[in-house]
Image (spheres, rainbow, N blue to C red):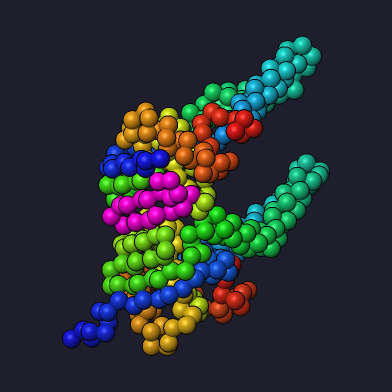
Amino acid sequence: MEPVTVNFAMTREDFIASRTAQLKLLMPQPYRFAIKFMGAVLIGFAAVLLAAGHLRYRPAPWLGALLAVCGVFLFFMYLPTVEASARKHAANDFDAGRCGPPARKVCFGENSVEIRSERYQAEIPYEMFYSAYEDGSVFLLYTGIGECRSVPKRTMNGEERKRVADLLAERLKRKFKQEGTREWTK
Amino acid sequence: MPNRKDEEPIAVTQTLTEEDFSAAAAAVRYFAAPMRRRSVRAAACLTVAALAASTVPASLNFFGTAWVSAAVTAVAFAAAVAVWFWQPVRETRQAALWFRSCPLMALPSTVTVFRDRAVVESKCERITEYWTDLSVCVETDGLIAAAAGKERGLLIVKKQGLSEEEAARLSARFRGAFERRYFRFSGRKRGNSSGTGHG
């Protein structure tokens, strides 16, 4: 298989997309469902308390209101708030020059991935990667916990993206996660 | 007139172990995040316990019961004890997990220390970290660690196997490069004789 080689300069949008993808990996679908479920439960409790207050006696209307506010926040606003905060911090980090040298070259070979930038040159066998992740905008390659190299998908055409995804799935197996794919179907 | 020998790069060949990494992470954490030291957190919990205990007479006077104050005191005190004993274990485990997640860190490597940067080379990687990008440097009896680089979270240089003169040159180079961001962590810190930075 011919290697897939990309040369690119990391842009602000790429960096924000990379951080957003890292956040999505940290907050998988079951976690998001659990947050929304807790919000729904709190809203339900609040409704019961408020109804009980009207029908029987008044335990504490403020408690029902507080639960309702917490439930609405968890159900509707918590995840968008976290994502917006992550994007804002990523933008600030990029503007402050904390994203490292922008120009990079990444080559996905048969047995290893070659990464070249001003301060980092590596040829890493696939078995040494901690994990990899793919969403709509980027591929993330983790060399360890918290150590992530991102490759924007805009640097590849459709066929190259598919080849890279297939290569990562074949070499990394369960260590390769894709957005929206359930673990037990892989 | 500057000594020519001071300008020469210093090369150190090393293979990091989990213990080295844990010690380096603990030492750096001690100075990089002083508010997270177990002594600070335990003191905060004990302060809360003391304040809650001080409200017991007032609670008895006004409400006839002090169970809330007593409960808060007990929980805060238990938290202080838990933090004191559990935090070092948790931090050591996290450092071990971090090290084990990255096989590249365990590869034999050569660290070349220049005046303005360090270059780490192994069979898979070549990493250049400039001092200006590192926020803190801590030297212990066994190693020198710096955080947090753009390419890798911790730069570790082991002093094991170096002659006294080389170790002194290495130490002087880091001291000169980091100045006020340089800290010396001796093993004689209170509460810990191994210099692992859990105070």
Whether A16 is among the magenta residues is: no
Vertical position of residue B23 compared to residue A104: above or below: below
At horizontal 42% and vertical 60% (from top left) the residue drawn is B124
In the rendered structure, the answer to whether residue A101 lies left or right of residue A108 reads left
At horizontal 27% and vertical 82% (from top left) the residue drawn is B6
At horizontal 57% and vertical 58% (from top left) the residue drawn is B100
The percent coordinates of residue A131 (x first, y second) are 52, 45
Vertical position of residue A163 compared to residue B34: above or below: above
What is the magenta segment's predominant secondary structure? strand
Front-most of residues B144 and A70: B144
- In the orientation shown, which residue stands out farthest toward the right? B64
Front-most of residues A185 and B157: A185
Front-most of residues A181 and B168: A181
The percent coordinates of residue B113 (x first, y second) are 34, 72
In the rendered structure, the answer to whether residue B77 lies left or right of residue B105 reads right
Front-most of residues B2 and B197: B2
Image quarter of the N terminus of chain A: top left
Magenta-tinted stretch: A109-126
Picture quadrant of residue A175: top right
